[in-house]
Amino acid sequence: MKKIITSLLFLALVATSFAQSIEFANGKVKSWYAPNTGLYDCKISLKNIKGQEVTLKYRKLSQVLPDSWSFTLCDNFNCLPYLPDTGTFYPMQDKEYAELKITIDSKGYADTAYIKYTMWDIETPGTIDTLDYSIYVKFNAYTNTLIKSTVTIYPNPANSFVTISANSGSKASIYSSNGQLILSKTLLVENENIDISNIKPGLYLVTVLNQEGIHSKQLIIE
């Protein structure tokens, strides 16, 4: 009897260790029919069902992308002006919701994008989910009103500081020309001075994320 009980406990522990940490209420394979102008969000939502804090990692498995489109990826902490090969979610609390969001701008070109990411709990790397994005823009796709940017950056070129004018609460990030995140912060006031004196001269991309969407502007640091 003791052997049976021990075996059952072992099996229960194994089952628990390989239990799924997250669930996808609306599925992991999704398709979207996007407009031919403006930004369009393609989201796959998830929920922590582990019963404790979970940290998720993701890796790009494959992509087929139109050259004419632009892409942005947001996890539950970072928004990047490209599709990264790998990334890590900010730790999620039990029952917390999040999403892996790909935002496209087709710029008026009809085409199709296919993107796959894998995702896993860092504590159970053997249990992997595959997220499948299919995004279609047809020739007769409806036209969205383009977002009128209320974000300005000055001076540009800049050397010691730059002022970002945007709604308070916006998240501003500066990326190098090779996509490396250099600086990121939440704006506390509508016209906030950002110290860039420690950033090397060169061409950078500034993204500002707020309720209007994602705004991207080039910045020259001298």
Image (cartoon, rainbow, N blue to C red):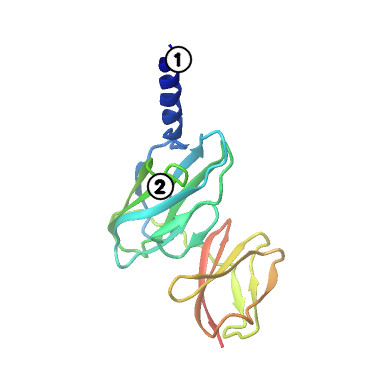
Please say if 36 is above or below 191. Answer: above
Tell which residue pokes out farthest to the bottom in this image.
Answer: 222
Note whether 64 is above or below 125 in the view shown.
below
Q: Earlier in the sequence, mark 1 or mark 2?
A: 1
Where residue 2 is drawn, which disc sits there? Answer: 1
Closer-to-camera residue (46/18): 18
Q: Secondary structure at mark 2?
A: strand
The picture places residue 135, in percent across and down from the top left corner, at: 33, 52
Position in image of residue 188 (x %, y %):
71, 63
Q: Amino acid at mark 1?
A: Lys
Which residue appears at 58% of the width and 56% of the height?
211
**Total numbered circles:** 2
Front residue (pair 182, 205): 182
Disc marking residue 208? none
At a point 58% along the width and 80% down the height, the residue shown is: 199
The quarter holding residue 37 reads bottom left
Q: Residues within 10 Å of mark 1 (few under 14, many from 20)?
A: few
**Relative side of 150 to 141, left or right:** right
Residue 174 spot, x, y in % from top left = 55, 71
Residue underneath mark 2? 119
